[in-house]
Image: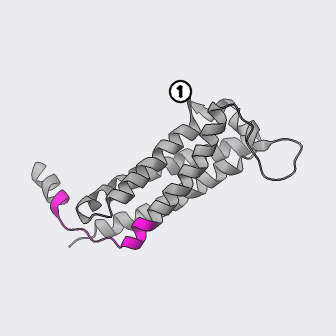
Amino acid sequence: MFKFIHNFLKRPIKIERFWKIVLIIMAIVGIADTSYLTYTRYENKILNCFGYTQVNSCQVVAQSAYSTVLGVPVSLIGLAFYFFVLIVAVMSLKEKFTFLLNTLLPLSVLAFLFSVRLTYLQIYVIESICYYCLVSALISVLLLMVSMVIYQKMNLPE
């Protein structure tokens, strides 16, 4: 077992720099998005929702019972996730840390499933849409797709 892990960590893995840069860009956009949501939550600010509607749908979602998990704001969980992706992607620019990219697939699957659940809640339970939340959900979908491509490239038989 330990020999397998040792060989796995030591084998050279070639992932194009392009994919790592894509991950970095997506993580930065995710950090900007969730930072704004987290800031407005902790500073008790009103979210700037796009459009001219009678009801600020972003604020409705942000203040709903579904905006926290065990007392932790969902936006803060997303912020931590995007920071993790950014750290892994930046570290993977050094070839000896490329193996860390394997951690992104399982986490991206969880983020995707979490986003699907939250989007469902917005549409069918809360009946309001938060555009910032949809941006984060889109990033989660894209991260899952990129993580699948990277995982496949990393785990092809030699």
Q: Residue furthest top?
A: 71
Above or below residue 122? Residue 90 is: below
How far from the left and from the top, in percent, is residue 18?
41, 72
Residue 61, magenta (yes or no): no
**Which quadrant is home to the C terminus?**
bottom left
The x, y position of residue 56, in whole percent, is 81, 42
Q: Nearer the viewer, residue 91 or 58?
A: 91
Label count reads: 1
Label 1 sits on a secondary structure element that is loop
Crowd around label 1: few <14 · some 14–19 · many ≥20 (10 Å): few
The amino acid type of the residue labelled 1 equals Leu
Farthest residue, direction right: 54
The one nearer the camera, 11 or 122, is 11
Residue 69, image x, y percentages: 55, 31
Residue drawn at (71%, 38%), measured in percent from left and top?
61
Residue pointed to by mark 1: 70
Residue at 67% in and 41% down: 121
Q: Is residue 75 left or right of residue 19?
A: right
Q: Is residue 10 magenta?
A: yes
- Residue 89 in percent (x, y) is at 38, 59
Image position of 100 with respect to 13: above or below: above
Q: Is residue 68 above or below residue 11?
A: above
Viewer can see residue 117: no
- Residue 40: quadrant of the picture: top right
| Part of the protein shown in magenta | 8-21
Asked if residue 59 lies left or right of residue 132, the reply is right
At a point 63% along the width and 44% down the height, the residue shown is 36
Q: Is residue 10 among what the camera can see?
A: yes
